[in-house]
Image (tube, rainbow, N blue to C red):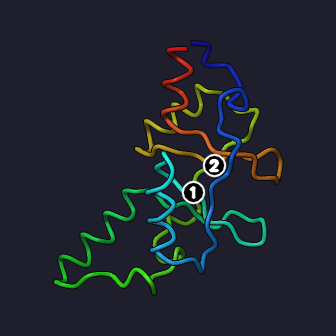
Amino acid sequence: MNTETPIKKIKTSKIIYVLPTDTMMKVEEIFESLPIHHILVIENESLRGIISKSDLLRVYRNYAAEGTIPDRHKLKAEELMTTDPITLDTEDTIGLAADIFLSNKIHSIPVFNGDQLSGIITNHDIIKYCFR
């Protein structure tokens, strides 16, 4: 594997997203219908955050610890998301992405081309690249 390869060569360009005001129910429906583990939260073409399946599990655990269940029709994406996610540029390298995944214990990074959201790269993308 060439760790100097730019991530634009392996990133996923199709952006799956929700609005900050979309419900937990909508987020769960997207996860159930697509083979993905991360959804971007976008408002006015600007990245606001990211939601992972792990974030949803954390919400369920927190409610269970309180002896309640979340109202999936009222909880909003902005209440579930991780704000200010780490981002990369399309010209950044696969090696840099791998270092960020390992040092931050995360599994996805939104990718920008300048100021424009361009896609997402995941640890799965790097594994596929290594074994293609």
Which sits in the foreground, 105 or 18? 18
Residue carrying label 2: 110
Specify which label sits upstream in the sequence, 1 or 2: 1
| Tag 1 and tag 2, C-beta contact below 8 Å | yes
Residue carrying label 1: 85
Which sits in the foreground, 9 or 102? 9
Q: Residue at image x 58%, y 25%? A: 95
Q: Residue at image x 69%, y 46%? A: 14
User: Label 2 sits on what residue type?
Assistant: Pro
* Quadrant of the snapshot with the N terminus: top right
- In this picture, residue 118 sits left or right of residue 55: right
Residue 40 shows which numbered tag? none
Q: Residue at image x 71%, y 26%? A: 9
To which quarter of the image does residue 125 belong?
A: top right
Q: Residues within 10 Å of mark 1 (few under 14, many from 20)?
A: some
User: Label 1 sits on what residue type?
Assistant: Pro
Q: Is 85 above or below relative to 4? A: below
Q: Residue at image x 68%, y 31%? A: 7
Instruction: Give the x, y percent position of residue 54.
Output: 36, 57
Q: Is 91 above or below relative to 60? A: above
- Mark 2 falls on what kind of element? strand
- In this picture, residue 120 sits left or right of residue 67: right
Q: Is 9 above or below relative to 89? A: above
Instruction: Give the x, y percent position of residue 41.
Output: 61, 65
